[in-house]
Image: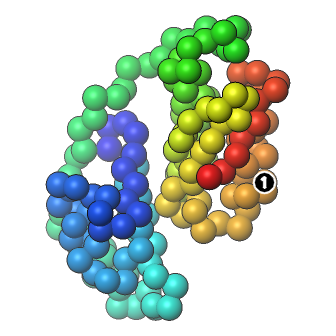
Amino acid sequence: MEHGNLSYESKNDYGEDQLGKLLFDKPEVKTVFIMDNFITVTKVDDVSWNPLKEQVWKTIDLNVTLYKSDKGAKLNIDVEKFLSLSNGEKLDAVEMVLDRSIRKNLAQDGGGVEVKGINGNIVEILYQGACGSCPTSSTGTLQYIQTQIRQQLHKDLEVKAV
């Protein structure tokens, strides 16, 4: 992908995406997460990766494409007065912090994070890809994200996984 990510939690999520459709044609596939230069596929719990792994690799190799995005413009947000920003600007500021300080590290482990919203001083996030099933996502990773957002935006912000 040029920018951003795609996250499919079920067959109902992939819309017109041919790769998503082909991956979900395999009943063993639970989720699909596409970002930058990788794809994370999770399987249902009671299924072995063999022979699913080979089927998934083949599907990706034969059907991978460059996903175009209208995102990509770098944000220039004055975060000095974070609390007085509009809700949209606050969301953009949080996205900026996640892009520069969090997402690359999560991507190295096959995961990501999506901002679901800001309610008061609470930033709501949703883990994607491998992060959704990682045991440290609710402790260490969440604390690290909160620390970065507090340091870069405002000391009173809290982060909650939804």
Q: Nearer the viewer, residue 79 or 123?
A: 123
Relative to 140, 30 lies left or right? left
Q: Amino acid at mark 1?
A: Gly
Q: Quadrant of the N terminus?
A: top left
Residue 75 location (% of width, % of height) = 48, 17
Q: Residues within 10 Å of mark 1 (few under 14, many from 20)?
A: few
Tell me if residue 147 comes above or below residue 81 in the rendering: below
Could you tell me if residue 120 is visible in this image? yes
> What residue sits 52% from the left and 85% below the top?
45
Residue corresponding to mark 1: 140
> What residue sits 56% from the left and 21% below the top?
87
Q: Residue furthest front?
A: 120
For label 1, the SS is helix
Relative to 125, 30 lies left or right? left
> What residue sits 28% from the left and 35% below the top?
69
Could you tell me if residue 64 is visible in this image? no
> What residue sits 38% from the left and 20% below the top?
73
Residue 129 location (% of width, % of height) = 49, 60
Q: Nearer the viewer, residue 41 or 116?
A: 116
Rendered image quadrant of residue 84 = top right
Residue 63 location (% of width, % of height) = 18, 63
Tell me if residue 104 comes above or below residue 12 in the rendering: above
Residue 130 location (% of width, % of height) = 54, 64
